[in-house]
Amino acid sequence: MGRREEPVVFSRSEGVFVINLQDLDEDQRIAATAPRGPVCILAGAGTGKTRTITYRIAHLIDQGFVSPNRVLAVTFTSRAAGEMRHRLSLMGIGGVQARTFHAAARKQLMYFWPQVAGDLRWKLLDNKFPLVGRAVRGARLESSTEKVRDILGEIEWAKASLIAPEQYPEKLGTRTPPVPAEKVADVYARYEQMKTTGEGLLLDFDDLLLHTAGALENSPAVAEEFREQYRSFVVDEYQDVTPLQQRVLEAWLGERDDLTVVGDANQTIYSFTGATPHYLLNFSRTYENATVVKLQRDYRSTPQVTDLANTVIAQARGRVAGTRLELQGMRAPGPEPEFTSYDDEPTEAREVAGKILTLLDQGVAASEIAVLYRINAQSAVFEQALSDAGIVYQVRGGEGFFTRAEIRQALSQLVRAAQRDVDETDLVRLVRRTLVPLGLSTQEPEGAQERERWQSLNALVDLVEELVTATPDLDFQGLLRKLHERQEAKHPPTVEGVTLASLHAAKGLEWDAVFLVGLVDSTLPISHAIKAGDEAIEEERRLFYVGVTRAREHLFCSWALSRQEGGRKTRKRTRFLDGIVIDPAPESGTPRGNRPRNCRVCGNPLDTPAERVVGRCNACPPQADEGVFERLRTWRNTTAQKENVPAYIVFSNATLMAVAELMPTSDNELLNVPGIGPMKAEKYGDEILEILRG
């Protein structure tokens, strides 16, 4: 069908509404108006895939190919399903079913169950952990929370991959199980047996898909009724489909081909759950008459961000690289991405906090800034640096460092150790010994949950080492007090705050400014991916690509050469920046604009971001008139109330102190105050100068 430039006008019983195809770019229109049948939309990050598929659904309805209640749109999250329903409703289209795979299967199974199982009752098992825990103990295995979760993850992967218990050992491939494969298979078999009770069946979420597929495959009457109801299917995030989900999709379709899929193989980052881009990559082979459209105009990011993303993914190897998309940044040009090497992690975290203060002073909202890392244990040092700088933050997709179960347990264990008569001068060694029973082994364990616990405990030991190094005469009670102070200093989660998140948790989100931190080999790519080989390393590259494409305008990439201050600089920058960062950045970072590095009073180095904003170390007395500073604070607080934002969003205390000490008398002098950018100078400059003149 040729392109339709005129608006699509729907006249329906519920009203008249207009959808203008000119709202779409050329490639989006081709995808939206493709003839009924198989359509594959290869949609890069930020290219408007949701808009495109909602317009495609509207087009199919407009052309009379299908009625709204005959469309089933499948997404991977309830949030995405809700977003699709909302967009369709804004277009005036009701009746389209937009659900996750599991939600759709559950609804169908509840309807068809009496036809396929008669009076046999079933109940949804929404928490598998207790049952798997019993199976683990029945197999005479350690039943720690992390061990049970890791074995549960293996069972979920096997079921998603259509692997039965007896097949598990031979189907592992490069996967490393948390316990011997035969033991996992034993637990898997026990778990499946336990779900059959005298009262009926317990079905987990994977069983919903298995039984739905089985009903359609084995009952012609069920298949006929279902296929009469649903005629057209749309699947989002098709690169993340598992073999089990694909089996359900094929059962839904039967011999039909009215299917639209949307995906980006470059964003395949969930292979560990059974997801595979195989079905997306082979779509045109499966359906020889398929329409394949590439969406490459990125409306999210600047050309500078998309150029880096393209360069990162251009180095990819393997099958996924064969369908590479080349993003075209459609936003106005912005700053170049920054690449910075630091001596150690605490310095990296402090400098990142400093740059965030600069962005806040320039008018970037805190909620539009994110710090992204590979593993959750990396958050600790950044949580501390943000707290020290007075920056509110929220941890997304995970708990804050001191609220994690393993850290709370570790601190309790250290308190109990302190209550005993401990004669140990080496506090770091004592802490390590105390945490060994909690999982602090010398070797990184197998299994994602146990590995995450191990990483968190190691991060706690690193923090202890940092505190002991800073205070050489620290005793055990003093150490506990400092840890408690660190714990208490954390800000509670808040919506209007900087986001801390893992790269996996950041998928599907976007911010104006993104900091990709901890970019060293053995962290990204993660060490167990390096051991697993090329395929796992390439998935890590795609994870880095996802991180890059979360940024709209500002992108900062950084890494630390050692873990602790004064430590040996043995780390190597991630291999994914090879050929991109040609000349290494200065080891200790680079100065930020007009921020001083030394105290203007005593000349000593400035250690914290707040000190660098003020230009004076905390040990030196303030040089500001106290009345001026208080008037500035009162004005700042009143302004924040009027704008309904936290006070620090207007100006931080450190910036106000710098203003009070430097006493600028003109716009140019105001811009010379560390931390004040052009946007805030234009917005608030006249009011500040008026206060200072008073």
Image (tube, grey):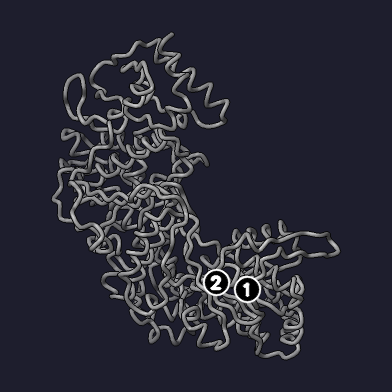
Is residue 640 shown above or below 123? above
Of residues 127 and 566, the one nearer the viewer is 566
Q: Along the polypeptide, which appears first: circle 2 or circle 1?
A: 1
- Kindly indicate the quadrant of the structure image that contains residue 5: bottom right
Q: Which mark is residue 2?
A: none
Above or below, comparing residue 253 to residue 557 in the picture = below
Q: From the viewer's perspective, is residue 235 above or below residue 423?
A: below
Say whether marks 2 and 1 touch (CB < 8 Å).
Answer: yes
Label number found at residue 234: 1
Quarter of the image containing the C terminus?
top left
Q: Which residue is mark 2?
A: 262
Residue 628 in the image: state x and y as whole percent. 40, 12
- Name above or below for residue 188 compared with residue 86: below
**Secondary structure state at the residue bearing disc 1:** strand
Is residue 65 visible from the viewing direction of this image? Answer: yes
Single out the residue that lies furthest toward the right: 13
- The kind of residue tagged 2 is Val
- How packed mark 2 is, by other alpha carbons closer than 10 Å (few <14, some 14-19, many 20 or more), is many
